[in-house]
Amino acid sequence: ALSNFHNIHRGKRCFILGNGPSLNNTDLTKLKEEYTFGANRIYLLFEKLGFETSYYLSVNKNISEQWSNEILNIQCPKFISLESSKYFPGSVESLFYLPHEDAGSPAFFKDITQGLWWGATVTYVSMQMAYFMGFEEVYLIGVDHYFKTKGQAHSLVQNNEDDENHFDPNYFKGKKWQLPDLETSELAYRLAKFSYEHSGRTIKDATVGGHLDIFEKINYESLFW
């Protein structure tokens, strides 16, 4: 049950990995002993890294529909949106379902068993999850907040060229994906920043060369000195 994860990492620090190209300029081997959250197709990195993220999240049903078998191969605890459960028949011990997205006004849920707002990005879901687990310091990496592909937010597109928006050229190559909604994401990130700071916790942005300007920037390498 989700409730088992409440405050299990109280006072600790963690890293939330986006899937931006900047991950290729970040020394991820330093994360081996850290708590990490990965999402969507982050597992494409696992073999090269030699380890998995501590937790895996995906709330976009297009991801589950196209890659449920690959997601099931991930060993760490996996959190999937309830509406994607149809792509994962049977019960899997390490698979947990997140509540339906709260369609009400934007919110930051400190208790994810009570609800969840997606904020148009799985990164925001990870922030709510990290809060629920008790993490005190959260560092973002690979959250480039920039996409070369332009178009109507949330629209479903298929790109047959190499994927320039993510760390791996095959990330969405030849596959369906939804264009980002950066405006809603920024609103969500501001809610997360307020909620963390109000509770004496912090989110800092250690993304190499990222375009997000909501969180305090911090040098990634300095976190390991």
Image (spheres, rainbow, N blue to C red):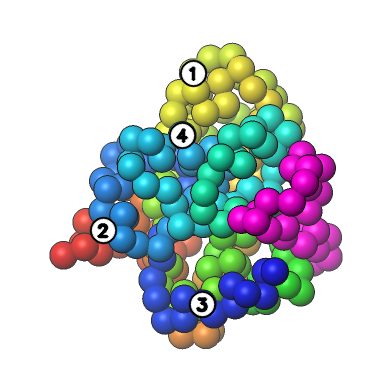
Of circles 1 and 2, which is in front? 1
Residue that mark 4 sits on:
44
Residue shown at the point (55%, 64%) measured from the top left: 127
Element carrying mark 4: helix
Residue shown at the point (59%, 66%) measured from the top left: 129
| Amino acid type assigned to the residue bearing label 4 in the image | Leu
| 54 or 127: nearer the viewer | 54
Residue that mark 1 sits on:
162
Residue that mark 2 sits on:
219
Q: Position of residue 136 (x, y in %)?
A: 44, 77
Give above or below for 161 relative to 124: above
Residue shown at the point (42%, 81%) measured from the top left: 11
| Amino acid type assigned to the residue bearing label 2 in the image | Asn
| 196 or 30: nearer the viewer | 30
Cα separation, mark 3 vs mark 1, equals 40 Å
Q: Earlier in the sequence, mark 4 or mark 2?
A: 4
Q: Are marks 3 and 4 in contact (CB under 8 Å)?
A: no
Judge the density around disc 1: few (<14), some (14-19), many (≥20) Cα neighbours within 10 Å. some
Q: Quadrant of the C terminus?
A: bottom left
Cα separation, mark 4 vs mark 1, equals 15 Å
Cα separation, mark 1 vs mark 2, equals 29 Å
Residue shown at the point (51%, 77%) measured from the top left: 8
Span highlighted in magenta in the image = 81-105
Cα separation, mark 4 vs mark 2, equals 25 Å
Of circles 2 and 3, which is in front? 3
Cα separation, mark 3 vs mark 4, equals 27 Å
| Amino acid type assigned to the residue bearing label 1 in the image | Asp
Residue that mark 3 sits on:
8
Of circles 4 and 2, which is in front? 4
Q: Quadrant of the N terminus?
A: bottom right
| Amino acid type assigned to the residue bearing label 3 in the image | Ile
